[in-house]
Image: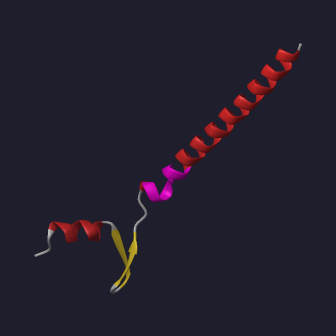
Amino acid sequence: MRSMRLAGWRDRQQEILPGVWEKKLNYFDIHPLAEVFRGIVYTSVLWGLLAFGVYTIYGIVAGTH
């Protein structure tokens, strides 16, 4: 009798040859969400640094006039 753990493991695998198993792709393998979130954070930080730099330069220029 197969245990529930083994049954679940076999559901996520695909036998391509006898004894050779290939992992089925799931949603997170196809859609790499971590990379998307990392990109969003990275661009947000860059936009924040750009805004800070522009505001700093504007403050310097406005302060000299």
In the picture provided, is 50 more to the left or to the right than 32? right
Q: In this figure, which colouring scheme has been used for the structure?
A: secondary structure
**Residue drawn at x 16%, y 66% as measured from the top left:** 4
Q: Would you say residue 32 sits in the magenta stretch?
A: yes
Outermost residue, front direction? 64
- Observer-nearest of 31 and 39: 39
Q: Would you say residue 30 sits in the magenta stretch?
A: yes
Which quadrant of the structure image shows residue 1?
Answer: bottom left
Q: Position of residue 9 (x, y in %)?
A: 27, 69
**Residue drawn at x 50%, y 51% as measured from the top left:** 34
Q: Does 43 sit above or below residue 59?
A: below
- Observer-nearest of 37 and 21: 37
- Observer-nearest of 44 and 22: 44
- Observer-nearest of 2 and 17: 2
**Residue drawn at x 40%, y 67% as measured from the top left:** 24
Which stretch appears magenta? 28-35
In the picture provided, is 36 more to the left or to the right than 7? right
Which quadrant of the structure image shows residue 62?
Answer: top right
Q: Position of residue 2 (x, y in %)?
A: 14, 74
Q: Position of residue 31 (x, y in %)?
A: 50, 53
What's the magenta bit mostly, secondary-structure-wise?
helix
Quadrant of the drawing holding the C terminus: top right
In the picture provided, is 3 more to the left or to the right than 20? left
